Image (tube, rainbow, N blue to C red):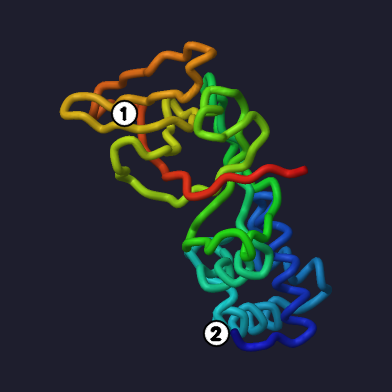
Amino acid sequence: MKPLTKKQQQILAFIENRLGDNKPPSQREIAEHFGLAQNAVYQLIGYLKQKGYLADTGGHRGLRLSESYLEQIQQEEGIPVIGRIAAGEPILAEQNIEGNIDLKDLFKPTKDAFILKVRGDSMVDEGIMDGDYVVVQPVTAIENGRIGVVLLDDEATVKKVYVRKDHIALEPANKAAGYKTRYVKRGSQNIRIIGKVVGCFRML
């Protein structure tokens, strides 16, 4: 991407911080923060759009980071860690990014891959322990028997997934604990496959 001037970098950093707080700034607020005229801010934002850093969804507070810039951030900072995932009983999926982990030496990350932290012991027979991290590739369909990430009643869980004619089976992998397979009717609005597990690691 094209390099930025110092002032453009400052404007972009301010917008990023505000977006990170879920408070998209208006051009007037940007102007007041930097002590600039609104015309000057309008021009600076125009340059940031031309150089591919910003996109505009329209409206008073429509500034957003562009997809190309978000991809660049991910490549520089690593794969985002998004919330946690339950491997036992489902736990509410937290969609906020907790940080980034660089795994280039361990995995070849696919586009849009993300990391979730495992809580629970229902997948220990597959080598996925409580506190481990799983690397997830977003998909909407999955091969039978593959370990996947499923949203169930707006909560996330990791299990072996089997898609049958009239139901989806979520199978745990911990014989000693006696966890039971859960069956959910296909087409139900309370279940959605969101990804497949492509890697697992733990912090020492």
Q: Is residue 98 left or right of residue 187?
A: right
Instruction: Name the image quarter holding the C terminus.
Output: top right
User: How many numbered marks does the figure carry?
Assistant: 2
- Quickly name the residue at label 1: 189
Instruction: Name the image quarter holding the N terminus.
Output: bottom right
Q: Is residue 114 left or right of residue 130?
A: left
Residue 180: percent from left, percent from top: 41, 14
Task: Kindly tell me whether residue 156 is visible in this rendering.
Answer: no
> Which three-letter amino acid code belongs to the residue tagged 1?
Gln
Residue 35: percent from left, percent from top: 83, 74
Give the answer, above or below, for where 16 lies relative to 138.
Answer: below
Q: Earlier in the sequence, mark 2 or mark 1?
A: 2
> Which three-letter amino acid code belongs to the residue tagged 2?
Gln
Q: Element at badge 2?
A: helix
Residue 95: percent from left, percent from top: 57, 41
Q: CA distance from mark 2 to mark 1?
A: 41 Å
Nearest the viewer among 154 and 63 is: 154
Task: Kindly tell me whether residue 89 is visible in this rendering.
Answer: yes
Residue visible at 48% across and 11% down in the picture: 178
Nearest the viewer among 164 and 40 is: 164
Residue visible at 67% across and 82% down in the picture: 44
Q: How many residues crowd around disc 1 within 10 Å: few (fewer than 14), some, or many (20 or more)?
A: few
Q: How many residues crowd around disc 2 within 10 Å: few (fewer than 14), some, or many (20 or more)?
A: few
Q: Element at badge 1?
A: loop
- Quickly name the residue at label 2: 50
Give the answer, above or below, for where 53 lies relative to 141.
Answer: below
Residue 118: percent from left, percent from top: 60, 33
| Residue furthest top in the image | 178
Residue visible at 52% across and 73% down in the picture: 68
Task: Confirm or deny contact between disc 2 and disc 1 (CB under 8 A).
Answer: no
